Image: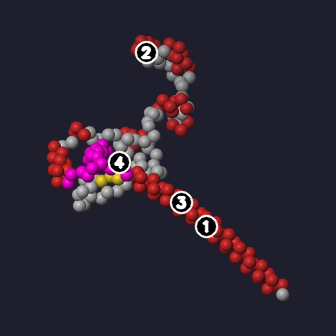
Amino acid sequence: MPLPSALLNKLKKRGIIKEENSQLDEEEPERKRPVDENKLCDGEKADNEKKYPPFAEHCPNKYNPFHVCVEFCHLNWGPKFNVYQLQMEYLEAKHHLLLTYPLAPGWREMFDEGSGQHYFWYPPSGLVSWLPPSHPEAKVTLPCYKHGQNNFRLACLESIQLEENDDNEVKVKMASTIDNVDVENEDNVE
């Protein structure tokens, strides 16, 4: 059904309807098809997706070898804390802690932007601690990303060993069943 001429002229003046398309609209209305995101062209997908680095800077799972950071990680795990935004009570408590338990030579005080806390790092060995190493409750350990790397390597080695053991067990089972079949056949023949 064509539009009334007065309405059509107003829409043309506003730029809603172009003169060339007005004839097509009058003859046959264009059908709108639902857009399937999976069927978008590669060019359209590239325009819709933002480019992010492979890991979100403060994602808690970035050291997990099975985790791949997606847009959610980049949007939600941005830098939350800044050294200059820390509360005075925290800074006073940290200063008192360092006066009571001074750092051993070679240890450095570092700031973790993800948690907003200071930690202590020993660069030659890569050891870290949330408390000064001279503190009685300090737990000096490897950083979690090194634990993750070591655990991943151990898991890979274990799976390889299990596969080798499974292959050997299967071969032994097959050999024993073949031997049993041969023995049974020999008994039946005699």
Judge whether 137 appears above or below 68 on screen: below
167 in magenta: no
- Region of the chain picked out in magenta, as a range: 101-125
Query: Seen from this angle, which residue lies furthest bottom?
Result: 190
Query: Seen from this angle, which residue lies furthest right?
Result: 190
Q: Secondary structure at mark 3?
A: helix
Give the CA distance from mark 4 to mark 1: 42 Å
Which residue lies under the disc numbered 3? 157
Q: Residues within 10 Å of mark 3 (few under 14, many from 20)?
A: few
Q: In x, y percent, where is residue 63?
A: 42, 49
Q: Secondary structure at mark 2?
A: loop
**Identity, as a three-letter code, of the amino acid under mark 1:** Asp
Q: Secondary structure at mark 4?
A: loop
Q: In x, y percent, where is residue 171?
A: 68, 69
Q: Which of pointers 2 and 1 indicates the residue nearer the eye?
A: 1
Whichever of labels 3 and 2 marks the residue nearer the N terminus, that label is 2
Give the CA distance from mark 3 to mark 1: 14 Å
Which residue lies under the disc numbered 2? 15
Which residue lies under the disc numbered 1? 166
Which residue lies under the disc numbered 4? 123
Residue 16 seen: yes
**Identity, as a three-letter code, of the amino acid under mark 2:** Gly
